[in-house]
Amino acid sequence: MTSAQLLLRYQALVDRERELGESIAATEARLGSDPAVVSREEALAAAQANHDAYSTRLGESDRAREEHRSRLRSRERELMSGRVRNPTELMQMSEEVSHMKARFADEEAAELQLMEEADAAEAALREAQDELERARQASSAEDPGLREQLREWRSELAEVETEKDGVWEQVPPGDRAAFSRVRVRPAVARVANNQCSACHVTVTTSGLQILRKGNALVNCENCSRILVQA
Ligand SMILES: [Zn+2]
């Protein structure tokens, strides 16, 4: 292999090394915390908070109704007791009682509505719990496959690193330095139809001759990439 071919291979191994590193990191993160499970946990927390808010409102509503009920009863008893004899006062008291009854009926209707909403919130909470459980089961069922994949990637990464180091060692020091000087990526480009495949500028005749001999590196005169004969 010529230096340029070795550098092309080296470049491919560097790319593969990076890809594997990214896949391994993403899978390790995924095994640590499954996004599907995390989103179900968040949905459950929201459903729980909604359910708790309804429980609080129902409790308050019960207490208020109880208080209004006992106030109504004591007014009714007073009205029926015969202690109040003044007709104006009796009239006022009777009106007050009928207002209290009307308000109490409204409160009962509101309470029924609230209870229906609380039931719906409880059903949503149970559904969120079931969905989280299903997501957890699906996640753990997926784990063995992911762990096997991770093992394969790690072993390929070790091979890639070994080969990459081996290829680099075969490149003469001067050509390694030339490779390191190229700032554009990828640093090595194939020649196709006498053109640099990266920037599509035609390679000079002398450049093509050196490439054919394969005994020295040729840089693209336009993009300065190291050229390799396809
Ligand atoms: Zn070029």
Image (cartoon, rainbow, N blue to C red):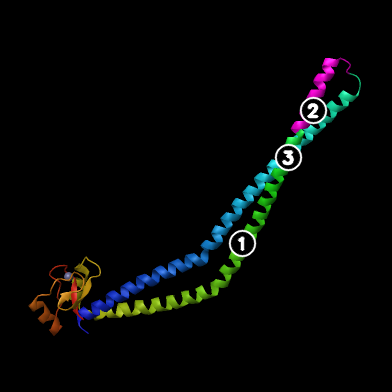
Q: Is residue 77 located in the magenta-colored stretch of the structure? A: no
Q: Secondary structure at mark 2?
A: helix
* Amino acid type, mark 2: Ser
What stretch of residues is rendered in magenta? Answer: 84-103
Q: Which quarter of the image is occupied by the C terminus? A: bottom left
Quarter of the rendering containing residue 1: bottom left
Q: Identify residue type, mark 1.
A: Glu
- Ligand 1 contact, mark 1 (Cβ < 8 Å): no
In the foreground, 201 or 212: 201
Q: Locate residue 1 relative to residue 143 in the image: left or right.
A: left
**Label 3: which secondary element:** helix
Q: Which residue is mark 1?
A: 131
Q: Is mark 3 within 8 Å of ligand 1?
A: no
Q: Position of residue 224 (x, y in %)?
A: 16, 69
Which residue was labeled with disc 3? Answer: 109
Spatial separation of the CA atoms under disc 1 and disc 3 = 33 Å
Q: Are marks 1 and 3 in contact (CB under 8 Å)?
A: no
Residue nearest the viewer, comparing 158 with 108? 108
User: Which mark is first along the chain, 2 or 3?
Assistant: 2
Q: Residue at x 84, y 30 (%)?
A: 73
User: Which mark is nearer the camera, 2 or 1?
Assistant: 2
In magenta segment, residue 93: yes
Residue 168 visible within the image:
no
Say which residue label 2 marks: 98
